[in-house]
Image: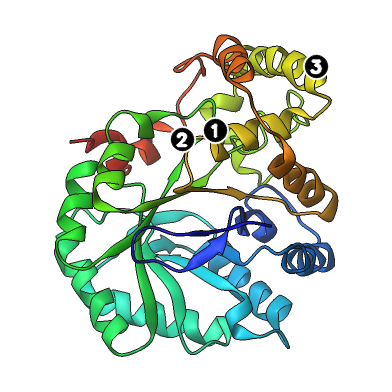
Amino acid sequence: MQYRQLGATGPRVSEIGLGCMGMSGIYGPSDRAESIATIHASLESGITFFDTGDFYGSGHNELLIFEALKGKKREDAIISVKFGGLRDPAAGWTGIDARPQAVKNFLAYSLQRLGVDYIDIYRPARLDPNVPIEDTIGAIADMVKAGFVKHIGLSEVGSKTIRRAAAVHPIVDLQIEYSLISRGIEDGILETCRKLGIGITAYGVLSRGLISGHWTKDRAGPGDFRAHSPRFQGENVDKNLALVTALQKIAEAKGVTVAQIAIAWVASQGDDIIPLVGARRRDRLTEALGALDVKLTPEDMAAIETAVPKGAAAGTRYAEAQMAHLDSEIGHN
């Protein structure tokens, strides 16, 4: 495992991170014992970067991580937490709250659930349209001074918001979806981050399993986010799986899997980019780790670009209502 500096002011983290969201029900049922075993296997492989959100399973994910990290050294895990997503008892979404008093309230609960004295990287999950980003970042900065937070990150925001946030306090990274079929970050956001010394933690590198080589049509069951995701619907899924078939030929020629090609492609976009893999099982984790040994030649990169051209994906990343909350999609400049 190699380690990289996360942004100009951030911690050193493993070159690949584990996104833990899928262990808390968003993609249908998951196995608790297998989830914990996967986190343990991640640590053993040298992964130090673990991403969660306080609203993943309404606290379930943080409690799971607490259980998995019990007895481990605190410094062995760099924990990234998103906050601000509001849920209801039926697991619905009701909005974003990033007011200064909410920041401190959410943080208090996360510290308790995770069983830690501080959060390594704390970030609003989305831009709260009712709260200036300066107020939200200022409140987290107060928590940095108080020792409850080490670093501040952002998630799914555009260039203008990034610049405003960075003017208040150093930002170590932007967490944003980035994959072969989600390349919006390349239209200005990546350049802004690089100018400001802000790293990228890329989630959705396999587009929620769509380009993993394991997805088949109509696989999403009850309670699975993908059952309502535009890219997994109707004609869209057929078009997107055709892209995977094209990618499969490149993978087979290199003797690797489609998932490994997709992860390696994201990792190859720069040393300032840390792919987050959403493995829920040890076998999927092992496959993802194999991507670190995949070296893509200029010829490979050209072949991948031909197989999956920028903008080739059918359907948006989220349903229309959720897309409206993505400052990264509407606030590029």
Query: Which numbered mark, 1 or 3, is in the foreground of this view?
Result: 3
* Figure quadrant of the C terminus: top left
Q: Name the residue under label 3.
A: 253
> Looking at the picture, how far across and down is residue 127, in whole percent?
27, 53
Query: Which numbered mark, 2 or 3, is in the foreground of this view?
Result: 3
Label 1 is placed on what type of residue?
Ser
Are the residues flagged by discs 2 and 1 in contact, CB closer than 8 Å? yes
Q: Is residue 169 visible?
A: yes
Residue 179's disc number: none
> Looking at the picture, how far across and down is residue 144, in whole percent?
31, 81
Q: Name the residue under label 2.
A: 318
Q: Which residue is at a point 58% across and 64% down the rendered structure image?
A: 49
Are the residues flagged by discs 2 and 3 in contact, CB closer than 8 Å? no
Q: How far apart in space, not on screen, are marks 1 and 3 (Cα)?
A: 31 Å
Label 3 is placed on what type of residue?
Ala
Residue closest to the eye, 166 or 184: 166
Residue closest to the eye, 271 or 89: 271
| Label 2 secondary element | loop
Q: In this view, does 84 lie to the left or right of 138?
A: right
Q: Is residue 54 left or right of residue 327?
A: right
Q: Earlier in the sequence, mark 1 or mark 3?
A: 1
Q: Which of marks 2 and 1 is nearer the N terminus?
A: 1
Residue 229's disc number: 1
